[in-house]
């Protein structure tokens, strides 16, 4: 993933500018920054969900903002995936259904999707069946969200405050899991987080720092 001189505007306000960021395959990077500094906006831009006012964002050699139609669907289904702060899971479903659904939406046959979902959840130590997702602990819940992000074998996983809603006892475990994705599953990982201790464990760490006009720039983490 390569961001080159990226600026993002919401309406007339420039939120981030001059963002240069390269994340090589199989590596992890973390971005910290205070609330409102533009972390989620940057992830949404890498997803292609937010337009960029200047610059380019390339994933697997393709400009995200020039993808159209089937290429854009392919990007969202197979190339990139997201882990959100609150997991964004369907609470009434079983964990295995939450994970399999991502593969089914990406075109996998139902049986294969369920089998792979079950294997991933077993690997991550989360009950797959017989419980609804809402009864899981916070740590288990986020592990299901990680499994859902991994089942499509994306080349890039984006994680937006993946430990932000967890108690201390689960924070480190889920943080370590997200940072282990490159070695265990081969996807590169970009985390945005408030958690400096988590950011320091990534291969590279950066901060989004607003200037006196409130426009944030990327700097190496202190
Ligand atoms: N869709 C939007 N429309 C207008 N302003 C937005 C939108 N999304 C975010 N913002 C504003 O952009 C700034 C950065 O937001 P965000 O990227 O969510 O920061 P962070 O994730 O670091 O807290 C904030 O001031 C926020 O209010
Ligand atoms: Mg945010």
Image (cartoon, helix red, strand yellow):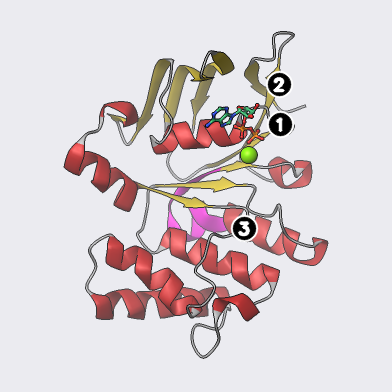
Does 211 sit left or right of 3 as displayed?
A: right
Task: Count how many numbered circles sit on residues in the image.
Answer: 3
Determine which residue is flagged by label 3: 86
Residue under label 1, please give it.
Answer: 33
Considering only vertical position in the picture, is 22 above or below 126? above
Q: Residue at x 29, y 62 (%)?
A: 105
Residue pointed to by mark 2: 209
Measured in 3D between alpha carbons, the distance from the residue under mark 1 to the one under mark 2, in whole angstroms, is: 6 Å
Q: From where the camera sits, is residue 24 visible?
A: no
Q: Quadrant of the C terminus?
A: top right
In the image, the residue with mark 1 has its CB under 8 Å from the nearest atom of ligand 1: yes
Instruction: Judge whether residue 91 is colored magenta.
Output: no
Marks 2 and 3 sit apart, C-alpha to C-alpha, by: 25 Å
Work out which residue is located at the far front of the displayed protein and give it: 11
SS at mark 3? Answer: loop
Q: What is the span of residues highlighted in magenta in the rendered image?
A: 180-190
Ligand 2's quadrant: top right
> Given contact means CB atoms under 8 Å apart, are the residues at marks 1 and 2 in contact?
yes
Q: Position of residue 33 (x, y in %)?
A: 71, 31
Q: Nearer the viewer, mark 2 or mark 3?
A: 3
């Amino acid at each position: 993933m390569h961001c080159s001189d990226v600026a993002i505007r919401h309406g007339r306000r420039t939120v981030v500018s001059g963002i240069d960021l390269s994340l090589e395959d199989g590596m992890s990077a973390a971005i910290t920054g205070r609330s409102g500094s533009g972390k989620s906006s940057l992830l949404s831009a890498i997803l292609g969900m937010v337009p960029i006012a200047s610059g380019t964002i390339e994933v697997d050699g393709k400009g995200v903002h020039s993808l159209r139609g089937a290429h854009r669907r392919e990007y969202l289904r197979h190339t990139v995936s997201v882990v959100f702060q609150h997991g964004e899971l369907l609470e009434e479903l079983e964990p295995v259904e939450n994970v399999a659904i991502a593969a089914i939406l990406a075109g996998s046959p139902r049986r294969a999707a369920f089998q792979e979902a079950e294997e991933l959840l077993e690997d991550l130590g989360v009950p797959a069946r017989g419980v609804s997702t809402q009864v899981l602990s916070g740590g288990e819940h986020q592990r299901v969200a990680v499994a859902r992000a991994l089942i499509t074998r994306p080349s890039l996983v984006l994680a937006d405050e993946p430990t932000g809603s967890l108690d201390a006892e689960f924070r480190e475990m889920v943080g370590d899991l997200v940072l282990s994705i490159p070695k265990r599953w081969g996807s590169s990982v970009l985390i945005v987080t408030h958690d400096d201790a988590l950011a320091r464990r990534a291969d590279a760490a950066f901060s989004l720092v607003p200037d006196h006009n409130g426009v944030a720039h990327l700097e190496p983490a202190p």
